[in-house]
Image (cartoon, grey):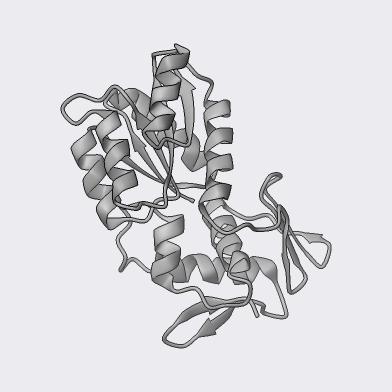
Amino acid sequence: MRVLVVEDEAMLADAIAEWLREEAHAVDVAYDGASALERAAVNDYDVVVLDRDLPAVHGDDVCRELVEAGSAARVLMLTAAAEVTDRVSGLCLGADDYLTKPFAFLELAARVHALGRRSRPAAPPVLRRAGITLDPARREVFRDHRYVPLAKKEFAVLAELLRADGAAVSAEQLLEKVWDEHTDPFTGAVRLTVLKLRRKLGDPPVVETVIGVGYRIP
């Protein structure tokens, strides 16, 4: 998934981002509300982890603008305020979930994952196609009952290809969903990752290149 973390406490923001990257998400970070809105205007995020108590552009205003702009991103609002009225007001602004500080990173990651499932069309919990079985919860991949150890990016690319259900997925789409904004689109990261993925999945080759379009698993 593509996630935007918006938090003005830099150490906390970076820690959240690192934790979510370990979960194989592509994560961008904004340290203020204005930067968050700029990123949301040019990137399609599945989930926005949004600190409510931002300086300058308040988190409430960020949430409101995302909703008014028709963003499909699900919003997980973070705040130190634990009163019921605070949670209710945040949800009324358009937030999809609410987590009070301090929190456990494990719980935050679980909530992000749950919101991510709601941000895209429903998919089976275990993805299967062409003899491949991918279990997102267990981070496991099998081909014809043979376990296939994959790196995080390889796993994420394979998941996107399986979710496409036979349709071709462009390199641009894979960059959008699997890598963050700091990735140079001309580095060949997608091509190299697909090459490694093909090698690990073994023969016969299952990931096809669709000339001028992208990649698919037919």
| Residue 77 x/y as whole percent | 41, 29
The outermost residue toward the bottom is 211
Q: Residue furthest left?
A: 56
| Residue 63 coordinates in the image, percent (x, y) | 32, 37
Residue 57 or residue 213, whichever sits in front: 57
89 is higher (above) or lower (below) than 72: above
- The quadrant in which residue 7 appears is top left
- Please report the residue visible at 33 percent of the width from the left and 24 percent of the height from the top: 11
Which of the 4 image quarters holds residue 29?
top left
Q: Residue at x 63, y 72 (%)?
A: 165
Find residue 208 and report its image quarter: bottom right
When the figure is inspected, residue 192 is found, relative to residue 96, above or below; the finding is below
The structure residue drawn at horizontal position 27% and vertical position 57%, both measured from the top left corner, is: 42
* Nearer-the-camera pick, 69 or 213: 69
200 left or right of 181 in image: right
Q: In the rendered image, which quarter contains the C terminus?
A: bottom right
Whole-percent x, y for residue 49 in the image:
40, 35
Q: In percent of the image, x 29 and y 51: which residue is there?
A: 69
Could you tell me residue 8's position as x and y percent?
Answer: 26, 26
